[in-house]
Image: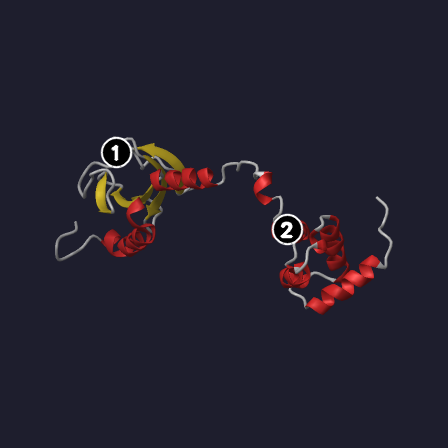
Amino acid sequence: MATETTPDPRLRTWAPVCQAVALLLGPYAEVVLHDAARDEVLAIWNPLGGRGPGDPSLLGELDGLDQAAPDVYGPYPKLLADGRRLSSVSAVLRDEDGRPTAVLCVNLDRGPLEHASALLAAFAAPTAPRPAPLFEQDWTERMNEVIGGYVRAHGRPPERLGREDRLAVLRELDAAGVLAVRRAVPAVATALKVSRSTVYTLLAELRDTPTPPG
């Protein structure tokens, strides 16, 4: 039997593991080491439900577990008296002869995760259509939509676009009326991460080439 001078060997073995998990998950999870023989709490870290060492574990009979049975169960749901929902994992720890000697349980409070999920869902809510009159004359918005749309569709950043890509972008910008705006070329060159002379060269080539059908 463990005493103050002779700690329980299971604690010597498993307490560092339990403490490491508790430190990693912080205040959002309790880690419980249960005494399988006495069916009581052997030690607990970050208690969530008011339990302490020596309290009943209420795990049931472990002697009936076959040695071939799985030793890890979960995640499975649990509920605290205050309404908090938990996700729990239990691991049966066996001695050298394969007999259950302790059970390690990790109970994660789902509340913070559910709050975070609700917050992210709110930010991801559908946006209202952009009021056209406010942006009717904003050619930079049109430029960004064209270039950004092409980049997203092709999965390459502007600096990795090839010559044919840039020609396709300029053709679309020209059709959108962006290139008819004075001072548009420097802005387009900056957005495409090329020099102004490159844009002018591509524009000359574009306007000397018949528009493809379709």
- Residues tagged 1 and 2 counted as in contact (Cβ below 8 A): no
- Residue type (three-letter) at the residue carrying disc 1: Leu
Measured as percent of width and height from the top left, residue 72 is found at 40, 43
Residue sitting at the far left = 4
Sort mark 2 into few (<14), some (14-19) or many (20+) by Cα contacts within 10 Å. Answer: some
Picture colour scheme: secondary structure
Reply above or below: 8 against 58. Answer: below
Q: Is residue 189 visible?
A: yes
Taking the spot 25% from the left edge, 31% from the top edge, the residue there is 82
Reply above or below: 78 against 22. Answer: above
- Residue type (three-letter) at the residue carrying disc 2: Trp
Q: Is residue 80 left or right of residue 157?
A: left
Reply above or below: 207 against 37. Answer: below
- Spatial CA span between label 1 and label 2: 69 Å
Identify which residue, 62 or 22, lies in the foreground. 22
Measured as percent of width and height from the top left, residue 24 is found at 34, 53
Task: State the SS at label 2.
Answer: helix
Taking the spot 33% from the left edge, 50% from the top edge, the residue there is 25
Which residue is label 2 attached to?
A: 139
